[in-house]
Image (cartoon, rainbow, N blue to C red):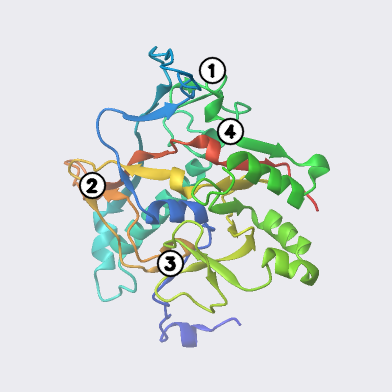
Amino acid sequence: MALSNRVISITQDNYIPVSIDGILNSNVFTSRLFMREQKKFSGRQMQIPLQFAKPTSGGSFSGVGSFDTSLQDTRVRQTFSHAQFYQNVSISGGEASLNKTDGEVLDLMKITLEEAQNAALDSIGDQVYGSGTGDDFLGLGAIVDDGTNTSTYAGLTRTSYPQLNSTLVAATAGALTFANMATVIRGSSAAGTKRARASIVVTTETVWDLLESLYTPTIQSNYDSLSRVQVSTYSKPGVVYKDQDSLKGQAGFEALYWRGIPIVADEKCDSGSMFFLNEEYIHWYNLKGVGLQQYKVASQVDSVASEFAQDYPIQWSGFDKPFNQYAQIGQFIMLGNVISGNTRRHGKYTGITTV
């Protein structure tokens, strides 16, 4: 409706005191990675020993025997370096001054900080699914592979050390099948153990919907799929919440349940893919930055990135004032890396387009 100056000249606008995020989407696995137990990055590089051979100096004998006492090399070092990420925050002094008048609806400084922090987490979420190229953090593209996309990992070649290979299965004619899912599980798990098998499956919304269509009431007892299951950012690997309308004090993600493994949708996930991840063997190793501090701004943005109360391992430099500008400039910083010391306990199902 067009308004006349009779109204416009004497009637104020009214602003709702919240900013709506129209950009960012879900970042499920990154949230779980950062909000679960974090490891400490220490030293110039992190070294994780990998056993690549079984000692062969043993066997049956008779009498007093004749033992093989030779020394054997069975281990090699996996080497990990840290990576660095920044998100800049710049605020004009004049704009901040105007905002601090009686006309303030939202705090310019706080909302700018929150938008920057959310942007940083979203960009890092992209790197979590990447291959660690350039200065990026290591991601699932490098961790969950068999040499198809990344020939080396942790300073070792996957050809020389096939123990670094994850289980990769490609869909036949793009079809999603329980048989192929089972193949990934068998290849990446140790039979009969809970710790050496996937604790979560992360996929796209499209593939999640395809999987849901495979579940019918006739197989409900086998797959336990039709009861309402949720996974939270804080829940332990493999733990789900069933038939709960809400999770007290924390946000939950809808999940399907297959072979006791929760399956969640993440909009950051690679198209047509399902990642079978063993969260016992993939962690964020955090490096505390000198002169940096943990910082969580009060929420003024209605965003998926603002749902979680616990601080991410993102650090704040504080504001500096340039000598030749009326402004304040600071950076959010993340130091460390995503590290998996046991990559063979992960798997990936690719090329899924239909059922």
Label 3 belongs to which residue?
A: 307
Q: Nearer the viewer, residue 12 or 116?
A: 116
Front of the two marks 4 and 1: 1
| Sooner in the amino-acid sequence: mark 1 or mark 3 | 1
User: Which residue is painted at 29% across and 53% down in the image?
Assistant: 91
Q: CA distance from mark 4 to mark 2?
A: 36 Å
> Residue at label 4?
145
**Picture coordinates of residue 180 (x, y %)?**
73, 45
Residue 36: image quadrant is bottom left
Q: CA distance from mark 1 to mark 2?
A: 42 Å
In the structure shown, which secondary structural element does the residue marked by tag 2 occupy?
loop
Residue 224 rendering spot, x and y as whole percentages: 67, 67
Which percent across, then down, holds residue 39?
Answer: 32, 45
Ranked by sequence position, the earlier of labels 1 and 2 is 1
Q: Is 105 rendered above or below residue 37?
A: below
Q: CA distance from mark 3 to mark 4?
A: 32 Å
Which one is in front, 56 or 68? 68
